Image (cartoon, rainbow, N blue to C red):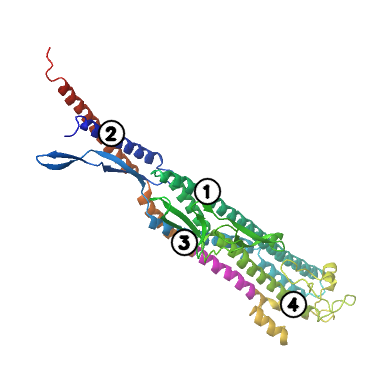
């Protein structure tokens, strides 16, 4: 037969369980607006029943309720999908940001753009061809040329500065990855220590998941949890990054990354590769495989090492074309009787956007600017140079063949193709980012529908647990009345 105090013990368990459930609900409400918080659930379960013997048979008699565990409302599949799409989204976000800055550097079309300076340069030659003996027209040609070279210098400098900034960004992101790795490793140790004792450290699990979410913005991540052979019912936590995956954190061990620098690179000390520091997991010097279009680190490296050098090479090619074409025509004519002959207009040794300059003779004396064959009123050379604005009509033979093969219809068309390609790349980045934004938003909403705190639901739970607590308290009062009656039986005054 069960104890006389059986009902009190059953009520005590009910009071304890409902009180804990109320506290968990309060914890949820308190963190309704906490970033990265996962709603916690009180899993109440029936306690082990007692066996009683009655009329020759055994019956199970329920002994009440207890709190089995406190779990998080988390969907591992949605987490994996969200982190995967976040890596893709952040790649295109980083690419979009860099390309938008390049649009600002080009500043096309505008009155202060390179194409406008180039057009004014050709127009100045055209005006000079009509008034070859006009000193003012010669001065304008010189000034327009200086403005054009300054524009090239400015663009080259801004591209170089952008490469240096991106390189600094690479260093910062490597440091961030290493910092996240150490934090996750420390959390793994704390979580396992708690789980070994049977605890479920939900708030620590949230903190670890939030760090992994942040890490997924920089590189692709993959989490694997497998049973620990040493501690039953406890998992080993492994975090891989990159594609194909490489281990960053293995339970209580965190690997570290390093940027290998090149003293002769951009800014004098750029990171040329990202490698693993030697440890028990990786050999020193093993490269990190970032994958394709995944994370801000990949976007930064792609822009710095591929897109910007290619763009600068196109500007250098344009400079070489301008210098070569103008000089080839200019040096065939004759300036004034007292001026030097066979003179280049641009310095033939400076064929890059960062170095283009006028020939010293042109810089020092506008009378060295060639307009024709040296006879009074001849502007044929100036006219031939101005014709480069629309094509190669003034070139012949090998020069014509080379220019057409390299620059197409004209120098202006060649630069226009460069501007158009940037526009296409910006549109692609915008389109890809917009698509990933939609996917990330949908997956975030899915996660919130599972893991987020609904105040309406929590208020309902408050009422439910409060009423259960009141009912259990009422049961204690009832049992007290019953025991008082039992103790007072047979007592007379």
Q: Secondary structure at mark 1?
A: helix
Q: Main secondary structure of the magenta part?
A: helix
Report the Cα–Cα distance between label 1 and label 2. Answer: 39 Å
Report the Cα–Cα distance between label 1 and label 4. Answer: 58 Å
Is residue 396 visible in the rendered image? The answer is: no
Give percent across and percent down for residue 465: 28, 37
The residue where tag 2 is placed is: 15
Instruction: Please identify, in this view, whether the residue under mark 4 or under mark 2 is nearer the observer.
Output: 2
Location of residue 7 (image quadrant): top left
Q: Quadrant of the C terminus?
A: top left
Q: Secondary structure at mark 3?
A: helix
The residue where tag 3 is placed is: 434
Bounds of the magenta segment: 413-431
Name which residue lies at 48% across and 62% down.
88
The residue where tag 1 is placed is: 183
Determine whether 153 is above or below 492 in the image: below
Work out whether mark 1 precedes mark 2 in sequence or the reverse, and give the earlier one: 2
């Amino acid at each position: 037969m069960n104890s006389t105090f059986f009902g009190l013990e059953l009520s005590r368990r009910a009071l304890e369980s409902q009180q804990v459930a109320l506290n968990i609900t309060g914890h949820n409400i308190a963190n309704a607006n906490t970033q990265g918080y996962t709603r916690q659930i009180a899993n109440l379960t029936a306690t082990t029943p007692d066996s009683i013997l009655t009329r020759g048979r055994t019956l199970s008699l329920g002994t009440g309720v207890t709190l089995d565990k406190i779990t998080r409302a988390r969907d591992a599949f949605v987490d994996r999908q969200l982190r995967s799409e976040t890596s893709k989204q952040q790649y295109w976000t980083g690419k979009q940001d860099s390309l938008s800055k390049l649009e600002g550097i080009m500043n096309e079309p505008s009155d202060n753009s390179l194409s406008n300076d180039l057009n004014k340069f050709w127009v100045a030659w055209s005006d000079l061809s009509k008034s070859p003996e006009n000193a003012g027209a010669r001065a304008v040609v010189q000034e327009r040329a200086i403005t054009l070279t300054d524009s090239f210098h400015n663009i080259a400098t801004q591209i170089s500065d952008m490469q240096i900034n991106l390189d600094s960004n690479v260093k910062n992101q490597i440091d961030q990855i290493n910092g996240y790795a150490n934090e996750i490793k420390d959390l793994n140790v704390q979580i396992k220590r708690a789980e070994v004792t049977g605890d479920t450290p939900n708030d620590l699990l949230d903190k670890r998941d939030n760090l992994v979410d942040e890490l997924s913005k920089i590189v692709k991540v993959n989490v694997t949890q497998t049973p620990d052979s040493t501690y039953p019912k406890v998992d080993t936590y492994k975090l891989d990054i990159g594609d194909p995956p490489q281990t960053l954190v293995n339970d209580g061990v965190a690997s570290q990354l390093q940027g290998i620098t090149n003293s002769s690179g951009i800014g004098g000390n750029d990171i040329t590769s990202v490698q693993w520091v030697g440890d028990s997991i990786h050999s020193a010097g093993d490269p990190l495989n970032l994958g394709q279009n995944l994370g801000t680190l990949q976007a930064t490296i792609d822009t710095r090492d591929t897109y910007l050098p290619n763009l600068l090479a196109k500007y250098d090619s344009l400079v070489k074309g301008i210098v070569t074409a103008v000089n080839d025509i200019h040096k065939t004519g004759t300036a004034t009787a007292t001026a030097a002959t066979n003179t280049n207009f641009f310095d033939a040794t400076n064929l890059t956007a960062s170095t283009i300059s006028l020939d010293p003779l042109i810089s020092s004396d506008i009378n060295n600017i060639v307009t024709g064959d040296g006879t009074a009123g001849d502007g044929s050379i100036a006219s031939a140079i101005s014709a480069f604005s629309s094509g190669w009509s003034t070139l012949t033979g090998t020069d014509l063949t080379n220019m057409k093969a390299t620059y197409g219809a004209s120098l202006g068309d060649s630069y226009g193709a460069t501007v158009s390609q940037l526009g296409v790349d910006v549109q692609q980045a915008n389109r890809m980012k917009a698509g990933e934004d939609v996917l990330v938003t949908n997956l975030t909403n899915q996660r919130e529908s599972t893991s987020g705190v609904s105040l309406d639901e929590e208020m309902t739970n408050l009422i439910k647990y409060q009423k259960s607590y009141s009912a259990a308290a009422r049961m204690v009062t009832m049992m007290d009345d019953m025991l008082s009656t039992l103790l007072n039986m047979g007592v007379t005054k």
